[in-house]
Image (cartoon, rainbow, N blue to C red):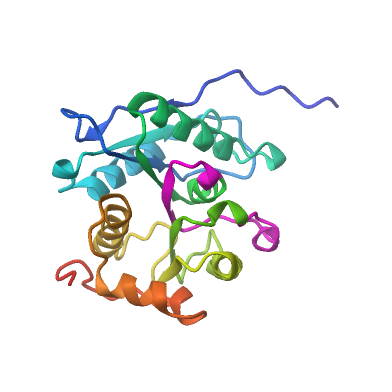
Amino acid sequence: MAQRALPEREARLGRPTGATDTAPQAVVLVLPGGGAAHSARRTSAVAAASALTLARRVTRSAHRDGVVSHVLHYRYRGWNDEAAHPAQDAEWAVEEAVRRYGDVAVSLVGTDVGARAALRAAGHPAVASVLALALWLPEGAHTTEPVRQLVGRQVLMVHGTDDAHSDPEYSFRYAERVKKVNSSVCRFEVHTDGHGLRRHSAEVAALARDFVLGTLCARDFARPLVDAMAAPPPLGLRMPLASGFGRTLR
C-alpha cells in the first residue's frame, strides 16, 4: 500500500515575548514536546501552552538584556523517521530568527521531541547554546544521533531519573558522546522526577534561566553549572539538581 502523503503545512513562530519594544540582541527559540515517533497531526495545544510558559520563565528578568523568545509551531507532531520534521522546522526557525532580527545569538530550548530537534539544529552559526529537557531518543538512537554539530556550543541536558517515557540512560549515553567532541557540555539529573519535570519545576526553570541567560547575555553561571561544566564524566553528566536551586543562585 502506498504511503499516504502528509498534508502541506508551514512551520511558524509564535508571538514574541520579552524585549518586544526594542531591537533584540538575542533570541530564545522554544521547541515544544508532546510529540510522537510518527504523527501527521499538528503540535498539541497543551504542548504549545507549556512551551510558552517555559519561554516566559526562561526570559523573565531579561528585558534589559534585549532577549526575545518565540515558541516554534511544528508542521507535524511526529519525528517521522528519517524526515525528522521537528528538526527541519527548528533549522527553519533559526534562519527565520536571523532574517527577522539580524546578527543575534540564538539559544535553542527543547523538551522531549523538541530537545532532540534542538540538538540536531545546533549547527547553524547563530546558535550559541542548546538546552535539552527530557530528551527523547528511541532505542538505539543514542549511539547514532549526530554530535558534531554541537562543537562550539554550550549544551545543558536535564532529565528526570523516573522518566518512564524517555529513558534517562539514553540521554546520559548520548551526553557521553557529545562530551568527547565538546567540553562545554553538562547534564543534570532531577531525582524522583518524571518526564514532565513537574515535581521540581521551579528548580528546573531556575536552572534553565541561569543557563540560557548566561550563554546569551554573558551573565555568570550559578556555581552548580560551573562545577558541572568543569567536572569530568560521569560526574558532570550525572549532576544532581539540588532541591531549592534558584532560591539562592550564587
- Give the image quarter of residue 172: bottom right
The count of marks equals: 0
Quarter of the rendering occupied by the N terminus: top right
Residue furthest right as drawn: 1
Counting from the top left corner in percent of width and height, residue 234 is at 51, 80
Residue 18 visible in the picture: yes
Tell me where the magenta segment starts and ends, as one range.
121-147
Residue 191 visible in the picture: no
The answer to whether residue 158 is magenta is no
Depth check: 25 or 52 in front? Answer: 25
Is 69 situated above or below 178?
above
In this rendering, position of residue 62 left or right of residue 180: left
Residue furthest top as drawn: 8
Is 102 situated above or below 155?
above
The answer to whether residue 125 is magenta is yes
Is 9 situated above or below 71?
above
